[in-house]
Image: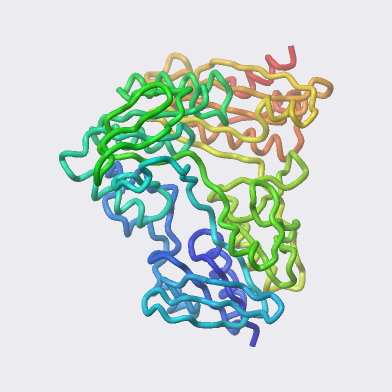
Amino acid sequence: MKKVVIIGGVAAGMSAAAKLQRKDPTIELTVFEQGRYVSYGACGLPYFLAGDIPQASQLIARTEEEFIEDGINLLTKRKVLAIKPASRLVDVLNLNTDHQEQYAYDQLIMATGAEAIIPPLSGRELSNISVLRTLDDGIAIKRILQDPSCRQVIVVGGGYIGVEIAECLARRGQQITVIEMEERILTNFGQRMSELALACLKEKGVTIRTGEKVQAFNGQVKVKEVVTDRASYPADLVIMAVGVKPRSTLAEAAGLKTGVKGAIKVDRYLRTSQPEIYAAGDCAETYHQLLGYNSYLPLGTVANKQGRLLGENLYSADQKPFSGAAGTSITRVFELGLARTGLSEEEAIREGYRVDSIFARVSDRAAYMPGTEPMHVSLIYTLNEGRILGAQVAGRGDVAKRIDIAVLAIMQRMTVQDLSRGDFAYSPPFAPVWDPFLIAARLAQK
């Protein structure tokens, strides 16, 4: 009987386990998860804090008991201490009993995910300084927020997670200050898109401090103040959202090679540098469809797809490569949606492309319809042939629909001329007769 061990029980790990178990129930499949919860939607955690999702249990797609009923040996509260590729063994600490155990494997999947970056700042050990990465983090933060004395919240970091947390806590009624060391928030987007998000946050009463670097936290037992290189701010709660890094220490100790940003190096089949060890999700590199080489894209969509692919490949003799990703993402700032895919103009130039871009402000529906809102779209394309390399959208309308159009255009290597000929759906309550991307593509041709 083949033995497969999976380290990590959230997105990639449980996607791989579920697929593999369905394909071949005879496999002896063991999953180790260091935390208490498995298979939950970490991307929903900000909305759990806001109260949009009343119970933490609603974020769990499948429970531990459900996986066990399906024949998966799922062991939570287990910390893998070491991987021994030569003998194909893993050493595991049972956190419930403090007893060390050893398990054999024929094939192993690393799905250890990523962890929040926590700079080594003075005062970091004070209570009420947290990150929002796991379900346990969300439960702990929500408990703090329910204390009536928790009024001033500082969010350190103005990227996706920081901005989503700021929105959700502002809707709860807390006074929010976002501190970002870069000169603008949401730097994955172009300048104009960032400015739209900034204006929306300020309109809702969120204080934004850009170009400031946090230097220390002050307080006795609990944090009371955040000190930057420009000022100091009172704080009842601090949430660090400065980014994530791959959990690859265990892999490195086992001799696996690492690559981009310290992520586990994999080939197109998600094989690592050690025989019969694979890696997927936020701990691993991802093949980038536009760059043509591996990048680091810690996204839930990527993790689930990679896990599912490994579930297929470990069962089937017909191995399939991972098709790659384009860095597609979407976020919300109150009523404003922002989405992007492919390369930004700066990224494209850095890769040696000669590019241009177009920015257009159009209506998301027929202009005469009640509730019509402006939609801002941007296309990044090559100068020589007009090939679309990237796109960004912001607006209060159906941003997801628009960015998905751009995703398919990029995957099919379409030009702005090709896109301008698209036959998109039109009806006044849903879309204008000229779709925003059709207008952008026509402008780009000029």
How many numbered marks does the figure carry?
0
User: Position of 338 compared to 408: left or right?
Assistant: left
In the rendered image, residue 220, in percent from the top left (x then y), is placed at: 24, 43
Screen quadrant of the C terminus: top right
Q: Above or below — where is 292 with respect to 225? A: below
The residue under the point 76% across, 23% down is 417
Q: Residue furthest right?
A: 384
Looking at the rendering, which quadrant does residue 422 occupy? top right
User: Position of 74 compared to 291: left or right?
Assistant: left
In the rendered image, residue 128, in percent from the top left (x then y), is placed at: 29, 45
Looking at the rendering, which quadrant does residue 214 occupy? top left
Q: Nearer the viewer, residue 71 or 205?
A: 205
Colouring style: rainbow
In the rendered image, residue 76, in percent from the top left (x then y), is placed at: 42, 72
Q: Residue furthest bottom?
A: 1
The residue under the point 69% across, 63% down is 256
Q: Nearer the viewer, residue 16 or 87?
A: 87
The residue under the point 72% across, 63% down is 271
In the rendered image, residue 180, in percent from the top left (x then y), is placed at: 46, 29
Q: Above or below — where is 155 with respect to 120? A: above
The residue under the point 57% across, 48% down is 298
Q: Nearer the viewer, residue 113 or 192?
A: 113
Screen quadrant of the N terminus: bottom right
Q: Residue furthest left?
A: 148
Q: Above or below — where is 237 with respect to 8? A: above
Q: Nearer the viewer, residue 53 or 268?
A: 268
Looking at the rendering, which quadrant does residue 189 occupy? top right
